[in-house]
Image (spheres, rainbow, N blue to C red):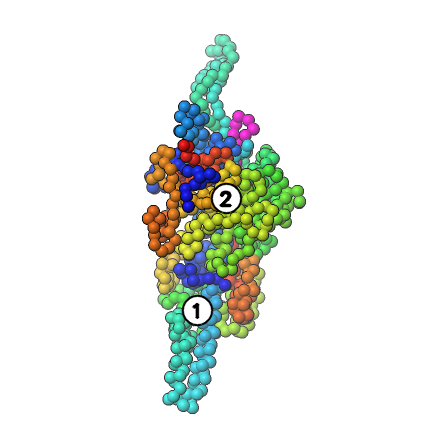
């Protein structure tokens, strides 16, 4: 396999890494979600401590074309705090499960961030001027004694250092009994959905005190529960269409025009199980951890524990492409069950023109799967490959037998170093890869 | 058919690992993770399926052995000197093949000689095989051979010094449905009629009406006042000590865990056909399945 991640033999090189260097990882710093905005200018991360950090791409330096534009911290704010549900005696984690950007409509940026129970709409705006010359207060805000005012003046705006402010504009709370796993903004730019284990709700971005329940798979008798919702997403162009994946490895496509409650799917995507592969853990590894539409809206991609599948929306009975992410783990499922790694939820993402998909693995490896050239490569996000513009070398895992030079054996993999969250710039070959507490940015090598 | 070849641990260990996960999920931050617990319950079901298949295969072999021995004994009366050797050979065929079955045979044969304290096996640890525990609770009045074989094989139990098992039966559990806010009180019922005794007697033993459990995923409240004398048992030693619970588990909660092994999580019983075939279409496939899925109720109940 030759090096290459994007189409046309793209070589990936290191650009930046964000986050603490030391190995002692504070739990609050564990990155839990990564998302580019629609232009790719902004890159948001959420962490376990409820914080959101937004990076902004600097405008390109024309005099130095080799030095690709860098992402620098633009705004940091505390999105969610830990809460306590007194009725149920449950602590609600502040961990940010998902961030989704709204398309930009004016000068300000908007994003939705969610923890297990509450979704918030944040407005991120710039302030580069401030009013000065008030009559009734001093510059520091203290009120002046009215008796001392002898003249009047008109306050004016004066330039100031750029300040980026994040303010919560809406809080969408108390609509989910179970843990929220997904949010997705509709192409109509007015509504969005939020999904938990058993239900999906439809919201209007302006209205916080009510939402419509559009999917409810909770059985009347909980004893009969066999599957939960694991991810949901709106179609990128059809505002009436959305999909949701389940723990049983199925994906349902629903049309909101059909009925108010979309319990009855329009399409059911399911691949029959291979009976020869049946093991104790068959159900776990078939559970879908992520579902993403392609940008063109014709395909969708699902990620389960060992593979990535591409589905054509017009064919329900099997995927059109299946890629093995780390098949060498199939014989290790028992250990991975014991140490809980088998429950890791890997995400996946498309590149801008839907020709390449990317997903993470263990040992800080991530996989680029080229659909058009039918090639795949394994790369590593490591502090050792951190020299500026250093080209990433493909990595290989030796499943068994004699280990070749430069290969790493399965038993040497570090299962604590997992890449669950990755994001691809919507237009350029720039990728953001989150290790446990670091964010790596890689770019296409420019010759 | 589940391929167990690639699994490093056996079904029994998987059951104990899974139970421990379910138990630990109660104290994890953020509340019970429905998805994860559902997946764990699938592993439990699969492990139990394999475990029961192995057990029934053993029993079948043991029955064959007993028949052979009976025949041997009858023939022995005719010619004691010649035929003993034949019988021993056949015994070897039955039981000598697997080391596990050897202990099983050993446990089954001199049933009457078993120490009576084995009856009071306290399910103090979630690591214990629930199969044995269920049978222990209900079957002590019935044929002891089967359950004791389970228990004997599961772990060499040290004698436990605490109040009799009876006190365990009185647990009441109160469940609150998160959505409807309906509160349901459920009493511990004799619902674990599976695995008991021999094929026919198991079903007949299930005379007490199964109190339909209205447990729900959500908040699980247990009243522990009925278990006043609960002192933690010396933790039963496992063959695989690595799987033994390392922290002292709240015994009342464990008994609650056990107490909900009753009615079915029938949704997981979609493979009922497979299981029935695996059990040779035998008896309490329904009851077996009912308690099979009971582990999932554990999640629910938590």
Return the residue nearer the eye: A232 or A273: A273
Mark 1 packing: few (<14 Cα in 10 Å), some, or many (20+)? many
- Residue at 51% x, 45% y: name it: A290
Residue B146 part of the magenta-drawn span: no
Up/down of B92 relative to B243, above or below: below
Q: Which residue is mark 2?
A: A371
Q: Which residue is mark 1?
A: B150
- Residue at 40% x, 29% y: name it: A66
Q: Position of residue A26 (x, y in %)?
A: 37, 40
Please state the chain letter of the residue tagged with numbered disc 1 in the rendered image: B
> What are the residue bounds of the magenta stretch?
A104-112
Q: How many marks?
A: 2
Query: Dot 2 lies on which element?
Result: loop
Q: Is residue B137 visible?
A: no
Q: Position of residue A194 (x, y in %)?
A: 55, 41
Mark 2 packing: few (<14 Cα in 10 Å), some, or many (20+)? some
- Residue at 50% x, 49% y: name it: A322
Q: Nearer the viewer, mark 2 or mark 1?
A: 2
Real-space CA distance between mark 2 and mark 1, rounded to the nearest whole angstrom: 53 Å
Query: Dot 1 lies on which element?
Result: helix
Could you say which quadrant of the image residue A9 lies in? top left
Please state the chain letter of the residue tagged with numbered disc 2 in the rendered image: A
Up/down of B126 relative to A61, above or below: below
Identify the residue at the far top of this view: A150
Could you say which quadrant of the image residue B113 lies in? bottom left
Left or right, residue A103 beside residue A324: right
């Amino acid at each position: 396999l030759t090096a290459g991640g994007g189409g046309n033999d793209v070589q990936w090189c290191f650009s930046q890494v964000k986050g603490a260097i030391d190995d002692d990882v504070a739990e609050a710093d564990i990155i839990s979600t990564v998302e580019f905005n629609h232009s790719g200018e902004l890159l948001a991360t959420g962490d376990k401590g409820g914080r959101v950090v937004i990076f902004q791409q600097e405008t390109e330096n024309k005099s130095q074309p080799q030095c690709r534009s860098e992402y620098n911290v633009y705004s940091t704010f505390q999105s969610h705090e830990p809460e306590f549900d007194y009725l149920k005696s449950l602590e609600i984690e502040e961990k940010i499960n998902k961030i989704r950007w709204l398309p930009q409509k004016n000068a300000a940026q908007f994003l939705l961030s969610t923890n297990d129970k509450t979704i918030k709409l944040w407005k991120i705006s710039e302030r580069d001027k401030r009013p000065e010359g008030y009559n009734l207060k001093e510059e520091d805000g203290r009120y002046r004694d009215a008796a001392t005012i002898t003249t009047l003046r008109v306050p004016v705006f004066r330039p100031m250092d750029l300040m980026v402010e994040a303010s919560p504009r809406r809080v969408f709370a108390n609509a989910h009994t179970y843990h929220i796993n997904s949010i997705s903004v509709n192409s109509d730019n007015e509504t969005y959905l939020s999904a938990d284990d058993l239900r999906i709700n439809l919201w209007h971005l302006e209205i916080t005190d009510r939402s419509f329940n559009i999917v409810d798979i909770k059985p009347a008798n909980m004893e009969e529960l066999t599957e939960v919702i694991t991810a949901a997403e709106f179609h990128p162009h059809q505002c009436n269409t959305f999909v949701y994946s389940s723990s049983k490895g199925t994906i349902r496509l629903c049309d909101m025009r059909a009925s108010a409650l979309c319990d009855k799917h329009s399409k059911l995507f399911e691949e029959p199980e291979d009976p020869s592969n049946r093991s104790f853990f068959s159900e776990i590894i078939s559970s879908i951890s992520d579902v993403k539409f392609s940008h063109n809206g014709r395909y969708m991609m699902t990620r389960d524990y060992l593979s990535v599948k591409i589905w054509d929306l017009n064919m329900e009975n099997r995927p059109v492409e299946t890629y093995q992410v780390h098949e060498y783990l199939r014989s290790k499922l028992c250990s991975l069950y014991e140490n809980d790694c088998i429950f890791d939820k890997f995400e996946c993402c498309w590149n801008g023109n839907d020709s390449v998909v990317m997903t993470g693995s263990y040992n800080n490896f991530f996989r680029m799967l080229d659909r058009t050239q039918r090639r795949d490569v394994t790369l590593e996000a490591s502090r050792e490959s951190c020299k500026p513009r250093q080209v990433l070398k493909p990595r290989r895992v030796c499943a068994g037998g004699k280990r070749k030079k430069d290969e790493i054996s399965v038993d040497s993999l570090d299962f604590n170093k997992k890449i669950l969250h990755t994001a691809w710039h919507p237009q350029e070959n720039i990728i953001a890869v989150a290790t446990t507490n670091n964010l790596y940015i890689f770019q296409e090598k420019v010759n | 058919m589940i391929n167990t070849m690639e699994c490093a641990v056996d079904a029994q260990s998987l059951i104990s690992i899974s139970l421990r996960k379910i138990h630990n999920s109660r104290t994890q931050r953020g509340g019970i993770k429905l998805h994860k617990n559902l997946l764990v319950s699938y592993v439990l079901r699969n492990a139990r399926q394999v475990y029961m298949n192995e057990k029934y295969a053993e029993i079948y072999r043991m029955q064959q052995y007993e028949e052979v021995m009976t025949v041997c004994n009858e023939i022995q009366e005719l010619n004691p000197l010649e035929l003993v050797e034949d019988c021993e050979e056949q015994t070897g065929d039955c039981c000598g093949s697997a080391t596990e079955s050897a202990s099983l045979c050993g446990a089954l044969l001199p049933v009457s000689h078993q120490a009576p304290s084995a009856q009071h096996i306290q399910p103090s640890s979630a690591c214990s095989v629930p199969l044995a525990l269920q049978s222990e609770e209900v079957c002590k009045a019935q044929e002891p051979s089967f359950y004791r074989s389970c228990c004997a094989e599961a772990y060499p139990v040290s004698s436990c010094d605490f109040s009799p098992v009876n006190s365990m039966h009185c647990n009441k559990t109160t469940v609150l449905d998160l959505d409807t806010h309906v509160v349901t009180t459920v009493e511990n019922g004799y619902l674990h009629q599976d695995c008991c005794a021999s094929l026919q007697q198991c079903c007949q033993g299930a005379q007490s009406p199964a109190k339909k459990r209205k447990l729900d995923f959500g908040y699980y409240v247990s009243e522990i006042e009925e278990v006043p004398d609960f002192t933690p048992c010396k933790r039963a030693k496992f063959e695989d000590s690595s799987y033994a619970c390392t922290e002292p588990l709240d015994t009342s909660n464990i008994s609650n865990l056990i107490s909900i092994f009753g009615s079915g999580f029938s949704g997981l019983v979609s493979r009922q056909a497979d299981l029935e075939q695996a059990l040779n279409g035998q008896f309490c496939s329904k009851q077996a399945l009912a308690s099979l899925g009971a582990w999932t109720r554990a999640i629910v109940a938590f």
